Amino acid sequence: MPFDQLLERLASGQGDIAAAGLTITSARQKSVAFTDPYLKDVTEVVVGRPGLGELPDLASLAGRQVFVRRGSSYVDHLETVSHRLESLGYSAIKIHQADSRLATEDILELVNSGAFDLTVADSHIAKIWAEVFPALKVYEHLKINEGGRIAWAIRKDSPNLAEHLNRFIDENKKGSLLGNILFTRYYKTNRWITNPLSGADQERLQQLKALFERYGRMYGIDWLKLAAQAYQESQLDQSVRSPAGAIGIMQLLPSTASGQPINVHNIEQLENNIHAGAKYMHHLRTSYFNDTAISVGAQVDFAWAAYNAGPAGIRKLRSVAAGRGFTRTGGSAMWRFLLLRKSAGRRSTFVRNINKYYVA
């Protein structure tokens, strides 16, 4: 579920609890209730890309572009700072609300890659991700907001639920040192994205744009999504060969490309490789995930995962997720579940990375 729709859907009865690192604000309290905070005195700080220079004070943000999570408290607090700067004669902060599919952690990864210059994060989130991305610049002195309280959101007509949740929160305090160690150990082994906006990558993309557009139109795929997939697969390098035998920019097995129903041969050639990749994506989406109850975005996500893992494996995982109470046609919640399964973590990372490249 998109983050910016979370509270609206909760208030309308489509859920009982929203647990998404929500800061309690007066605007949010108009539509939902909150449990007791499980984190207090939270500070929201500015985080910059590796190599970014010093920013001595909040006035340094004037005229700069800052990418933050859509619908987050960061937006409201940045707007407050921006208005204050304007009243003092400075330029406004250019606040860019990133795609609602991106969590704060995703945006931090994009900042680390150099795709974005600046973002805002809760200080505890910024510090723990700085352990994973040590080159990130955490400007602890640039405080967008202080004294924040983070809690779970519930509907206003749920006093009994609030009582039970408050008891649970009281008995289960903030994460332990062991939890932080395990977090860092897992994420330091992950494959992190690189900056798709670098000069060399942009030059390659411009050279390939016409081919992505041609086969994107032919198979009903946004050419930028096709390009993002190719970047995740090979960083737009036709010479890449995988140990499993996958070839080229779209990393397809020759047997998959030449077999039915794809029937595209000689994928050692660049154009044939892109053609085969686009046609295979179209086949996966229309043959396995073409359900009107599945949003188009979720269909593409499932097709990407199937491209990486095989359609049978993804269909099996959908069935497992359904057995755990997730709708078989769900998008975001389904992927959150799959991400927690050891067998699916790599697939979910694959899909999330493509979405990040597409947004960047």
Image (tube, grey):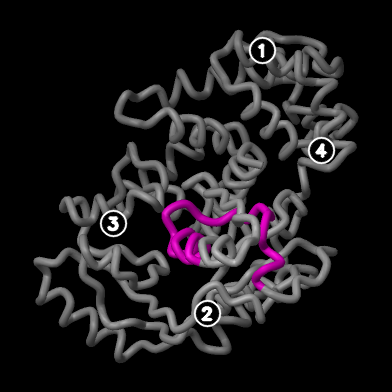
| Residue 242 - label | 4
Q: Which residue is mark 1?
A: 215
Find numbered disc 4 in the image and state the secondary structure of the residue it sits on. loop
Find numbered disc 1 in the image and state the secondary structure of the residue it sits on. helix
Front: mark 2 or 1: 2
Q: Which residue is mark 3?
A: 7
Q: Which residue is mark 2?
A: 43
Q: Is residue 303 depicted above or below 193 in this figure?
A: above
Q: Residues within 10 Å of mark 1 (few under 14, many from 20)?
A: many
Image marks 4 and 1: residues in contact by CB distance under 8 Å: no
What's the amino acid at mark 2? Thr
40 inside magenta stretch? no
Magenta residues (range): 58-80
The answer for how far apart the CA atoms under marks 2 and 1 are is 47 Å
Q: Position of residue 45 (x, y in %)?
A: 60, 73
Identify the residue at image location x=10%, y=76%: 160
Q: Classify residue 185 by image quadrant.
A: bottom right
Q: Position of residue 29 (x, y in %)?
A: 24, 68
The earlier-in-sequence mark between 2 and 1 is 2
The earlier-in-sequence mark between 4 and 3 is 3
